Image (cartoon, coloured by chain):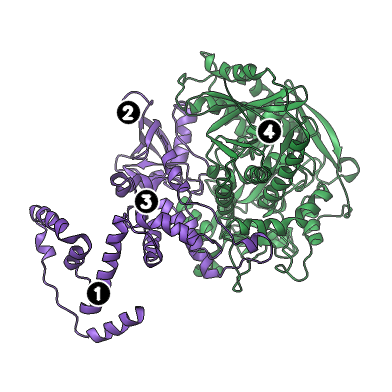
Chain colours: A purple, B green
Amino acid sequence: MVEEKEITVNIKKYDGKNDPYWKTYKVRADRYTQMTEVLRRIKTEQDPALAYRASCHMAVCGSCAMKINGFPRLACRTMAFDVMDENNEINLEAMDYYKGIRDLIPDIDTFYDRMYKVMPRLYADESVIAGENEQRMTPSEQKEVWKFQECIWCGLCVSACPSVRMDEKFLGPAAHAKGYRFIADGRDTKTEERINILMDSAWRCTSCYMCYEVCPQDVQPVIAIKKTKSYLNEYKGNTEVTEMARKHDDTVFDLINNTGKIKESTLYLKTFGFGEAIKDINYMRKEGKLKYALAKDNDVKNIDEIKKIMGDKK
Amino acid sequence: MEKKEYDAVILGGGLAGLMAANTVAEHGFTVAVVSKVFPTRSHSAAAEGGIAAYIKGNSDPNDDPDFMSYDEVKGGDYLVDQNAAELLSQKSGEIINLLDLWGAPFNRQPDGRIALRYFGGQTYPRTRFVADKTGMALLHTLFEHASGFNNIDFYPEYYVLDIVKNGNNVNGLVAMQMKNMDPIYLKARALLIASGGLGMIYKHTTNSYINTGDGYGIALRSGVPLKDPEFVQFHPTGLYPSDILISEAARAEGGILKNNKGERFMAKYAPHKFDLAPRDIVSRSMTIEMREGRGFEGGYLGLDLTHLGKEYIMDRLSLAYDAAKTFAGVDATEEMIPVRPAQHYFMGGIDVDITGANSDLNGLFAAGEAACVSVHGANRLGSNSLLETLVYGRETGNTMVEFLKNHKNVEASDGTDKILDNAYKYIKRENGEHFGTLLNELRDIMWENVGIFRDKNKLEDAVRSIKKLKERSLNMYVTDKTTNYNTEVFNALETRNMIDVSLAIASAALNRTETRGAHFRDDFPERDDTNWMKHTLAYLADNDIEIKYKPVIVTKWKPEPRVY
C-alpha cells in the first residue's frame, strides 16, 4: 500500500467584497496526489463552496494556475508531497497581479487582451490559400515554432513578471512568445507588421528570467524576446526605447570589436547617456555597488582574431 | 433577463465547436460560442497522439481512403455507418491541409512534408501529429483563427442551462455568466451542441474535470435521443494511480505492455497486431491479466519504453515521459510506466445524421464527441476523434449555413423563465443532499457495474441505483447562496446532467444482449449480427429510458469476424 498522510491545506478565501482570509482544511493524500485532486477532495467532501478552476489535470489546458507556497505554479503539475513543509502544510492563493474574483479564481481577461494584441494567427501566402502552392516546413523550423507554440495561456508568466507591473507598454512574456512563434514560421506573411508590434515592447523586458522560471511548459518566453530583439535591424520604426536599443546594439558591437569584451559601464553610458548615468551612479553609491561599475577591466590579447570574426558578422 | 440574438449559437469551444464556428462565420453569419471554460481550456487540448489522415501524395503508396474506411468499420465492430466512415476518410487529407494553412505546426519529414506514424488498428500508418500534444496544438490553432473573425462572439465561462424551443424549432439557449450568475438568453435559429464527453461519470477517467456530459443532459431533457450510449471506451494506458492518459503513441512508437512475469501478454490476445490492437481489445486483455493475478500489486501493468532509447523518447514521447515522471515518479527511460485502463471516450452521443443534423428538433445540430454520427460504431480507433471533430465540425458547419439560408427567424418563445427556475431551485432549497455525495456514488456505480466487463446483474443493479440517485437529486441543494462565481451551483447542475446520461448508458447496456466492440457482456460474449446490427436510440421519459432503434448503414463491407 502507498503510505497516506494527513496534510493541512491553507487556502486564501476571498468573496469579492471583504478582505481575504485564510481557511484551513485537513485532507488525506499520498505521494501520487496532485494538488488539483486535493482541491477536488476538499470541494466534494468538505467545502462545496470553494472556488477554483481546473480542467485537464495534465498540464495542457492552463486552468489551474495559482500560487502554491507563494510560488506561481499549475496545481495539477504539483504533487502535494513535493510542496508540503515539515508540518505537512501547504498554502494556496490566487495568482498575483490579476484582479481577484473569488477564492483561487482571478480575472485574467487582461492576459487574453495581451495575446490578442500580437495578431496571434497565421496569415498564409495568397497563392497557398488559392491552392496553387503547398506549404513546407523543415523539421528544425517546426521545432522552433513548436517550442513557443507550446504556451497554454495559463497566465503564470504575466503574474510573475516585474516589467508587466512597472511598464504598461510591455506586452508581457506570453504575448512575446506567441508573437515570435509567427515570426519564426516561414509560412507566415506578416513578419514586418509583427516586428512593428513587438520590437519596442521586446526592449522593455529586463531579462530577469522570472517567466523562464515559472513557465510550466518550459516555453522560455524570455528567449523569444531575445530572438525578437535580434530583428532590430529590420525594424523601420523609431521609438524612445528602440533608439536606445540601437545605441545598445552598436555599442556592444564596437566594444567587442575594439576590446574583445562587453564593458558594462561604457555600454551603460552610451546606451542611456550621461544624465541618466549620473542619477544611477548616485543610486549605486548609496547602495554600495559603485565599486563594481568602476572595476578595471583588461583588454583581451589576441584582438585581431576577434576583429576578424566580428568583421565576418558585419 | 438579458437577451442577444445571433444566427447560430454553438455550445462548446473545443475543436468541433470552433471548426463549425469558423465555417459558419466564413459565410457571413453571426455566431456565439458559449462554453463553461475559456476555449483553450477545452478537453480537445488533452488529445495527445495525433490525427489520422490519408493525404494524397503524402501517405503510404499502398494506402487508399477505402482501406482507411475499412479500418474504421472493422475497428468499430460493424456498428459504423459506412457512408459516414467513407466521408471521414475522404475528407481527412483536405482537413489536414486546411489546418496547415491556418498554422498548425505538424511534425515534419526531412523534405518538409507532414510526418506520419502508425496508430492502433491502422493497416497503414496515417497518424499526423504535433509531438504528443496534437490536440492542444490544433485547439490553439483553431481558436487563434476564430479570434480573427468579427462575427464570432465568445462567451467563455458561461454555463448553459437548457435549450429554448418554439414548438419543434430550436430557438437558442439560456446560459448563466459564471462570475456573476447573470442569466442570458442567446436567441438563435441554429444551435450546435459540441460540448464534448462525459468521463467524470466514471471513477477512473482520463478526461478533464469539465467533462460532465452537459450537452447530453441538455439534449435528453429536450426530448432528443442519445444514439448508442452503451458504447464507452476504456483506454488501455491510464497512468497508475492518477488516470492521466499515456498516449497510444507510446505503443505506436514501440512501447510494449508487460505483466508481472515480464511477458508481452498481448501476443496471446492479438497475435498479429499485438499491443496495437484496438483499444477495447487491449483494455479487456489487460483486465483479464490482472484478474488472473498477473498484474502488479495495487492493480496495474507495465508499459515498457526502455528499449526505445532516451533521445527517441524525449523527441517523440515527451509528454508521456513527463507525465510518468511528474505524476508517478517513474523515469520511463529506465523503468516501466505503471498503467491500467480508464474511461476515455464516449462513442455514443446526440443522434445526428451524416450532415450533423438531428431529426427530432428543427435547427439542432451536434458534432464531435457530443454527437454520434456513427463513424466510430462500437469502438473508436486512436487518432480518429480529432479527425472527427474537424471533418464533421466542418460538415456540420456547412449544413448549418444551408439551414440558415433557408430558415428565417423563429418567433419569440416563452419558457426561458422556467429554465431558470429549474436551475434556481437548488439554490432556493435550504437543506437536502450535496452534489458531492451523489456524484461520488454515481462514479462508483458506473465504474463497478457499467465498466469494461458487464452482465445482467451488474447492469440491473446500476439502473436501479441510478434511478434512486435521480430521485435523491431532486433534493440536491447548494450551501453557497452568493452570486459571486458560485461554482457549487454549476457542480449541482453538472450532477443533474451526469445522472441523466448515466441512466441512458446503463439502460442501453442492459438492453443490448450481445458483445460488440467496447460493450462486453460476460453473459452474452458473442456478437449477434442477426438481432443487434442496429443502433440504439435512448430517450429520457420522466424517470425512465425509452429505447428505439435505427438501422446501421452498410455500403461496402459485410460483417466478418474481428481478428487482430
Q: Answer with mark 1 or mark 2, whichever residue precedes in sequence.
A: 2
Identify the disc placed on residue A214. Answer: 3
Q: Secondary structure at mark 4?
A: helix
Q: Who is closer to the viewer here, A249 or B63?
A: A249
Identify the disc placed on residue A254. Answer: 1
Residue B299 visible, this angle: no
Chain identifier of the residue bearing label 4 in the image? B
Picture layout, residue A23 above or below residue B297? above
Residue B240 image offset from top left, x and y in percent: 54, 49
Identify the disc placed on residue A20. Answer: 2
Residue at numbered disc 4: B216
Task: Kindly indicate the quadrant of the structure image that contains residue B522.
Answer: top right
Q: Secondary structure at mark 1?
A: helix
Q: Nearer the viewer, mark 1 or mark 2?
A: 1
Query: Which residue is outermost to the right?
Result: B530
Tell me the crowding category of disc 4: few under 14, some 14 to 19, or many 20 or more residues within 10 angstroms, Cα based.
many
Chain identifier of the residue bearing label 2 in the image? A
Q: Amino acid at mark 4?
A: Tyr
Q: Amino acid at mark 3?
A: Val
Q: Who is closer to the viewer here, B180 or B341?
A: B180
Task: Kindly indicate the quadrant of the structure image that contains residue B56.
Answer: bottom right
Q: Spatial distance from mark 1 to mark 2, Cα to Cα?
A: 54 Å
